[in-house]
Image (cartoon, grey):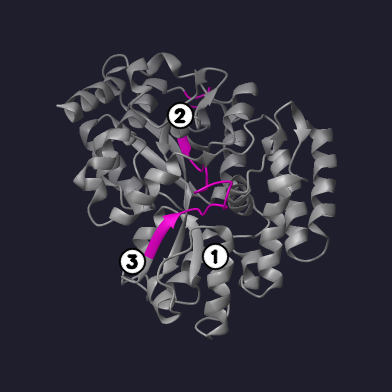
């Protein structure tokens, strides 16, 4: 009965488009990495087109790193821009202030507020308005090679970030793998997501509570996170190539059995357990991001994403119906192997849980502590500064404290 009520409420979304859908071509922009695969999205879209014979969707897939600028450029393209775009949790403030996305608040039934996770809503909200529908509820998890841990005599995975280093040293000393840890620490947003995860565990903040324009990442848990990252490289526990890696590089190294631990998004769970994709299939465990004794029990970054309609789309009703289909609870449950649903009720459904019980259990803890990157209109500039300064510290080009003091000074100028 509860599931039926939730599905009925969700179906209201699809009914909000006014009238029958006209013959229309929609242009939709997605990313080509992490979360749903391109094939997943093509299959979802084929189902939508079959149910709406008058609508054709042209899909474009770009790397995450190109997504932001593609959206910005498309707004100036008039009717030739996109009708539906995938956007990151860190962009709504900028996009709302600059008038890039349509306010969809009136299209979204209020009864859905309690049925979707708060962290997912954060993805699309700015100053009380909703500029899209949550679609990807994601955070990074700690994956570990159960066979390597067993050979090392380690009975259970680490619960804290300090325990991770201890276990990594044991594995390295036993010669089981040269570099037990692998991360996506290229000078990119991927590195900032790892940094945010660790920062949250150490009780760090991006800005001071008493002065939201005063940077806090050059002290306390925020600085400790950079020192932790740099220390793992200096001690030879982290693969030095991590400073050039993105998420897919991390997955490949772990899948080859060349790392004992890896921090990565939800999608990795399915692929590292696929014998066609991974040599460690069936030898993988997963837990939430780790904690810090006396400070936290788990850690997570909010890596969620939403679907929105650019203000210049001439097909807003058809675009909304397409978004309604992609974000529908039953659709999300059908494709839950690479991206878990945004709907709370889905986490007891066999379509979501069966075969990935450990992941869903880890998600239950992680979703509750997802930490946001700064939700400010100048985030792109702030992230660029942090990327440069943190990466310099990881490469040993500068001391962590010096690097983060410089970052704080430069961010003050931006804010």
CA gap between label 1 and label 2 equals: 32 Å
Give residue 145's quadrant in the image. Answer: bottom left
The residue to which callout 3 is attached is 273
- Answer whether labels 1 and 2 touch (C-beta < 8 Å): no
Is any part of residue 307 visible from this angle? no
The residue to which callout 1 is attached is 164
* Residue at image location 43% in from the left, 41% down from the top: 367
- Percent coordinates x, y for residue 406 in the rendering: 85, 47
Quarter holding the N terminus is top left
Q: Main secondary structure of the magenta part?
A: loop
Instruction: From this view, report whether residue 183 is shown above or below residue 8.
Output: below
CA gap between label 1 and label 3 equals: 22 Å
Of marks 1 and 2, which one's residue comes earlier in the chain? 2
Q: Which mark is residue 364?
A: none
CA gap between label 2 and label 3 equals: 30 Å
- Percent coordinates x, y for residue 175 in the rendering: 53, 86
* Residue at image location 50% in from the left, 48% down from the top: 297
Give residue 397's quadrant in the image. Answer: bottom right
Name the mark nearer the viewer: 1 or 3: 1
Is any part of residue 28 visible from this angle? yes
Q: Callout 1: helix, strand or loop?
A: helix
Q: Callout 3: helix, strand or loop?
A: loop
User: Does residue 163 appear left or right of residue 306 in this picture?
Assistant: right
Q: Which mark is residue 121?
A: 2
Quarter holding the C terminus is top right
User: Does residue 294 appear left or right of residue 267 in this picture?
Assistant: right
Q: Which residues are magenta?
A: 285-313
Q: Is residue 410 magenta?
A: no
* Residue at image location 33% in from the left, 34% down from the top: 343
Q: Callout 2: helix, strand or loop?
A: helix
Pointer 1 local density, CA inside 10 Å: few below 14, some 14–19, many at least 20: some
């Amino acid at each position: 009965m509860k599931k039926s009520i939730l599905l009925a409420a969700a179906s209201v979304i699809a009914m909000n488009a006014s009238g029958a859908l006209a013959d229309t071509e929609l242009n939709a922009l997605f990313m080509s990495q992490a979360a749903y695969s391109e094939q997943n999205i093509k299959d979802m879209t084929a189902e939508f087109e079959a149910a709406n014979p008058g609508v054709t969707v042209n899909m474009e897939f770009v790397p995450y790193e190109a997504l932001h600028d593609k959206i910005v450029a498309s707004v100036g393209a008039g009717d030739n821009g996109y009708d539906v775009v995938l956007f990151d949790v860190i962009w709504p403030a900028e996009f709302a202030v600059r008038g890039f996305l349509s306010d969809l608040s009136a299209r979204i039934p209020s009864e859905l507020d309690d049925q979707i996770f708060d962290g997912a809503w954060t993805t699309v909200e700015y100053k009380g308005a909703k500029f899209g529908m949550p679609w990807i509820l994601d955070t990074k998890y700690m994956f570990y090679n159960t066979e390597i841990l067993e050979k090392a005599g380690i009975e259970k995975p680490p619960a804290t970030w300090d325990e991770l280093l201890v276990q990594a040293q044991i594995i390295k000393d036993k010669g089981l793998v040269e570099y037990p840890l692998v991360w996506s620490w290229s000078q990119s947003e991927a590195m900032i997501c790892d940094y945010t995860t660790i920062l949250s565990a150490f009780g760090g903040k991006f800005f001071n509570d008493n002065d939201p324009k005063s940077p806090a990442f050059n002290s306390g848990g925020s600085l400790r996170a950079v020192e932790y990252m740099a220390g793992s490289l200096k001690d030879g526990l982290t693969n030095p190539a991590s400073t050039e890696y993105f998420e897919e590089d991390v997955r490949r190294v772990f899948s080859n059995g060349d790392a004992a631990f890896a921090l990565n998004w939800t999608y990795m769970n399915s692929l590292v357990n696929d014998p066609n994709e991974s040599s460690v299939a069936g030898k993988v465990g997963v837990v939430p991001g780790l904690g810090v004794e006396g400070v936290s029990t788990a850690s997570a970054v909010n890596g969620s994403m939403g679907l929105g309609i650019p203000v210049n789309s001439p097909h807003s009703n058809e675009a909304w119906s397409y978004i309604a289909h992609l974000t529908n609870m039953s659709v999300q449950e059908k494709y839950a192997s690479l991206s878990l649903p945004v709907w709370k009720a889905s986490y007891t459904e066999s379509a979501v849980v069966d075969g990935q019980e450990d992941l869903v259990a880890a998600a239950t803890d992680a979703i509750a502590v997802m930490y946001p990157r700064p939700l400010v209109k100048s985030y792109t500039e702030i992230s660029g500064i942090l990327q440069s300064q943190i990466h310099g510290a990881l490469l040993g080009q500068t001391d962590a404290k010096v690097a983060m003091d410089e970052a704080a000074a430069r961010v003050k100028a931006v804010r």
